[in-house]
């Protein structure tokens, strides 16, 4: 038996393959590393020789060919340096409280009396103007905090409603807050004038300023009561309020308090299919019809936009590998995104000197270019409206529904077959993600619980203590059956789910490389042929994904893995990545 997934049915099975996953004669360590910068520069980093030194070296001939110059750069291993300095930072006291209470009906952790007193006192002093700079509590934070409190009081189960300590603190502070808070926040905290017990009339009578806010307030009345909006209602609000416009760091459109309450409230009430569809499709037409690439196969990779903070992120290097045998890929994301603020593909490409300000049509050219075969598109180019929310998303703390739906985008279409691969972490999101993929009309879709909820499947041993939720390397997906196009209503799909055990394919168990050793060093070392954990993960993720998506030539999982290894060992994958860096600057 050669396949993980039988082409005749949805039955699943594994087989062992003789794959050599270690180099018996590893190259000697080198003492210096060349890296490229976004603006076309590079820097030579001197390091002392050591037995585990990474050998990811761009030689002088390559650097001269790319026309690079010596200059400084920021290491993606220190991803916090990519946060835009112009973004005001949230108040940490209130942010910690938001992390506890602005979450789901079963995950919420009520505040103690001491914690509640501290948070409400901080908010009161901030709105009175007694706190300055980073100590100030932003409007977005205040909106998210009180939205969380209101939804808990109105609709959460008893164990995650207000604690006695929270109630005592609110009874003490609310009369003072009522005199200090603006009307929009009073509405969020007590929309019907019934929660606080003082019979205030501000909440029931509040309608907002202007037609846009009036629509947002109407939607919020339903959300704050624990209700759900329909597809058209969600899309209508999003298109009304986005993109956010700022002057001197402050929104000039709708109230940030109201918008943050809207976003976090929909997350707390749980995302329905119609909500997720609305968020997923709302801005498909923002820049007009998607360009169509003249390729036979295109895979859209949906990594979590907030990056990795702990483990090696392999997708950029996997894309270079897959392009060697005609499997085109489109990666998308941002440079930096809360709440995690981790290492992203855009950071890595910037660091290596690639152009990450590509338009959709320029990315299409890279995908069609036989010397490249993959592309990265930044959200700030593809969806300016959604990109305008980054600052506000940091201040609401928890991930909004957009964190799920932005992974399932088709910024570019293909004349041939299309697939979508997306990562997830929390159980319950795998089916909504697959639903959105089918809604996109792709031929095949795959969700992967990789490390940190990203797409990188691992070769490390599964922890014996892991018992809650799906294990790392869990996969679920579908493939179109037959030759009909996936856009037809009567198309049938073959569904599957399985846990990939790398040891079944003769990969040796290894600990996952961490991000304090740069993703770039590890990835380039692997593409240079250095065997080890990063190399194994690139091979595993390229071959298994090819097989599960039903890619041509990957029916036999042995062949799928072997051709990924050959793409690296021949030097073709490294050449593709270097071509990407060079060609991305030549596009007009």
Image (cartoon, helix red, strand yellow):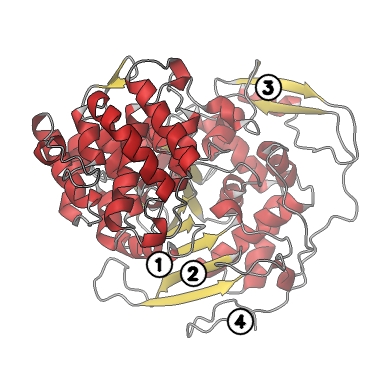
> Hey, which quadrant is residue 285 in on the image?
top left
Circle 3 residues within 10 Å: few <14, some 14–19, many ≥20: few
Q: Check if mark 4's residue and mark 1's residue have beta carbons within 8 Å.
A: no
Between disc 1 and disc 2, the foreground one is 1
Give how far apart the Cα atoms at labels 3 and 1 are. Answer: 49 Å
Q: Secondary structure at mark 2?
A: strand
Question: Does 152 sit left or right of 52 as displayed?
Answer: left
Q: Give the Cα distance between marks 1 and 2.
A: 8 Å
> Do the CB atoms of the residues marked 1 and 2 lie less than 8 Å apart?
yes
Q: CA distance from mark 4 to mark 1?
A: 22 Å
User: From the image, which quarter does the N terminus lie in?
Assistant: bottom right
Residue underneath mark 1:
431
**Badge 3 or badge 1: first in the primary sequence:** 3
| Tag 1 secondary structure | helix
Circle 4 sits in a helix, a strand or a loop, which is it? Answer: loop
Label placed on residue 476? 2
- In the image, residue 10 sits, relative to residue 559, either above or below, namely below
- Give the distance between the C-alpha atoms of the residues marked 2 and 4, in whole angstroms: 14 Å
Closer to us: 265 or 408: 265
Give the image location of residue 136, x and y in percent. Answer: 41, 21
Position above or below: 45 against 199: above
10 Å neighbourhood of mark 4: few (<14), some, or many (≥20)?
A: few
Disc with the residue nearer the chain's start (2 vs 4): 4
Identify the mark at residue 169; answer none if there is no mark. none
Q: Is residue 362 visible?
A: no
Q: Quadrant of residue 271?
A: bottom left
Q: Earlier in the sequence, mark 3 or mark 4?
A: 4
Q: Residue at horizontal 59%, vertical 32%?
A: 79
Q: Relative to 463, does residue 134 appear above or below in the rendering?
A: above
Name the residue tied to disc 4.
13
**On the rendered image, what quadrant is the C terminus found in?**
top left
Question: From mark 3 to mark 4, how far is it between C-alphas?
Answer: 50 Å
């Amino acid at each position: 038996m050669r396949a993980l997934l039988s082409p005749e049915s949805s039955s699943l099975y594994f087989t062992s393959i003789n794959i050599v996953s270690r180099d018996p004669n590893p190259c000697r360590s080198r003492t210096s590393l060349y890296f490229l910068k976004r603006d076309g520069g590079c820097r030579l980093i001197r390091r002392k020789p050591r037995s585990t030194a990474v050998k990811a070296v761009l030689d002088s001939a390559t650097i001269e060919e790319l026309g690079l110059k010596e200059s400084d750069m920021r290491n993606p291993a220190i991803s916090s340096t990519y946060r835009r300095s112009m973004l005001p930072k949230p108040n940490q006291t209130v942010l910690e409280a938001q992390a506890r209470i602005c979450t789901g009906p079963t995950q919420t952790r009520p505040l103690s009396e001491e914690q509640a007193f501290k948070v409400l006192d901080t908010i009161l002093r901030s709105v009175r103007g007694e706190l300055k700079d980073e100590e100030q509590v932003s409007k977005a934070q205040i909106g998210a905090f009180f939205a969380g409190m209101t939804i808990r009081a109105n609709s959460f189960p008893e164990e995650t409603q207000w604690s006695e300590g929270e109630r005592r603190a609110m009874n003490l502070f609310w009369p003072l807050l009522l005199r200090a808070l603006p009307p929009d926040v009073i509405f969020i905290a007590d929309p019907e004038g019934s929660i606080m017990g003082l019979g205030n009339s501000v909440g029931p009578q509040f309608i907002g300023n202007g037609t846009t806010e009036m629509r947002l307030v109407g939607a919020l009345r339903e959300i704050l009561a624990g209700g759900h909006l329909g597809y058209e209602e969600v899309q209508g609000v999003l298109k009304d309020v986005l993109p956010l416009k700022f002057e001197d760091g402050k929104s000039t459109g709708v109230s940030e308090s109201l918008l943050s309450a809207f976003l976090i409230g929909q997350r707390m009430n749980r995302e329905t299919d119609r909500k997720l569809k609305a968020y997923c499709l709302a801005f498909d037409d923002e820049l007009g019809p998607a360009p169509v690439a003249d390729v036979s196969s295109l895979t859209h990779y949906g990594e979590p936009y907030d990056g990795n903070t702990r483990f090696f992120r392999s997708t950029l290097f996997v894309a270079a590998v897959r392009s060697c045998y005609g499997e085109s890929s489109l990666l998308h994301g941002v440079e930096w995104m809360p709440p995690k603020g981790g290492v992203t593909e855009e950071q890595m490409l910037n660091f290596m000197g690639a152009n990450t300000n590509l338009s959709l049509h320029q990315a299409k050219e890279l995908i069609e270019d036989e010397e490249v075969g993959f592309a990265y598109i930044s959200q700030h180019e593809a969806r300016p409206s959604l990109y305008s929310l980054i600052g506000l998303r940091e201040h609401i703390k928890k991930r909004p529904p957009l964190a799920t739906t932005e992974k399932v985008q088709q910024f570019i279409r293909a004349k041939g077959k299309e697939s979508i691969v997306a990562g997830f972490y929390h159980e319950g999101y795998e089916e909504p993600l697959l639903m959105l993929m089918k809604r996109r009309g792709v031929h095949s879709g795959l969700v992967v619980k990789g490390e940190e909820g990203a797409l990188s499947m691992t070769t490390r041993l599964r922890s014996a203590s892991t018992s809650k939720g799906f294990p790392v390397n869990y996969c679920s997906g579908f493939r179109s059956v037959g030759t009909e196009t996936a856009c037809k209503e009567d198309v049938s799909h073959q569904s599957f789910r399985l846990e990939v055990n790398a040891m079944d394919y003769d990969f040796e168990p290894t600990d996952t490389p961490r991000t304090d050793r740069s993703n770039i060093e590890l990835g380039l070392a692997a593409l240079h042929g250095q065997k080890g954990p990063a190399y194994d993960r690139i091979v595993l993720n390229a071959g298994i994904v090819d097989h599960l998506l039903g890619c041509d030539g990957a029916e036999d999982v042995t062949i799928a893995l072997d051709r990924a290894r050959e793409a690296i060992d021949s030097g073709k994958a490294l050449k593709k990545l270097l071509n990407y860096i060079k060609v991305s600057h030549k596009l007009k």
